[in-house]
Amino acid sequence: MPLYSLDGKSPSVHPEAFVAPTACLIGDVTVEAGASIWFNTVLRADYAPIVIRAGANIQDGSVLHSDPGMPVDIGEGATVAHMCLVHSCTVGDGALIGNHATVLDGASIGSRSMVAAGSLVLGGAQIPEDVLVMGSPAKVKGPVAGTPAEFLTKGVPAAYQALGKRYLAGLDT
């Protein structure tokens, strides 16, 4: 896996985390236990830290980047789905960022909330806990509870934690 130091800061990956061999981690990146970083993902912490908390998953083709003084913090069990752009923001525990969504500088996604696929969360937006947001710009559409989004926010993290363990144990290069 490509891990690059920059200005004396190196990625730190827990031995029980999976990082795909084509993922690229640069600088002050921390990946905690049970987290997974999938193929062709870029985590570029050249200005501020990027922290991927325990059990979170960053799926294929996503890009995470931090600006000066504006870290990226992905909460425990959170999901950043395929091809997302996550820039200098916070994603709460158990939240899900849907495929090809964008979350911009200073935004905060509340725990267990879901950003629908293709949505744009503007910089500085404060999304509450337990809600579904969608659109461009993203707006709150209602609670996650009792919707198909609830299944995704609860089911995807466990599935990716199991898949990460499977890849750690059996991926051959």
Image: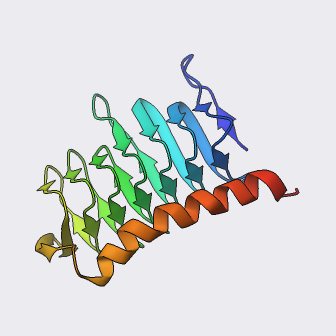
* Side of 12 where 66 appears, left or right: left
Q: Is residue 156 above or below residue 166?
A: below
Left or right: 104, with 96 as reference point: left
> Which quadrant is home to the C terminus?
bottom right
User: Residue 99, percent across and down?
Assistant: 42, 73
Q: From where the camera sits, is residue 39 visible?
A: no
Q: Could you tell me which quadrant the N terminus lies in?
A: top right
Residue at the image position 57 percent from the left and 62 percent from the top: 160
4 vs 131, left or right, is: right
> Viewer-proximal residue, 11 or 105?
11
Q: Residue furthest front?
A: 146
Q: Position of residue 104 (x, y in %)?
A: 26, 54
Residue shown at 20% from the left, 50% from the top: 107
- For residue 144, what is the image quadrant? bottom left
- Residue occupying the point 45% across, 70% down: 155
Name the residue nearer the viewer: 58 or 118: 58
**Residue that extends furthest to the right in the rendered view of this protein:** 173
Q: Residue at x 19, y 71 (%)?
A: 133
x, y (%) of residue 137? Answer: 16, 70
Q: Quadrant of residue 166?
A: bottom right
| Residue 81 visible in the picture | yes
Please name whichever residue, 12 or 121, is drawn nearer the observer in this view of the structure.
12
Residue 129 lies, with reference to residue 135, above or below; the image says above
- Horizontal and vertical percent for residue 79? 43, 60
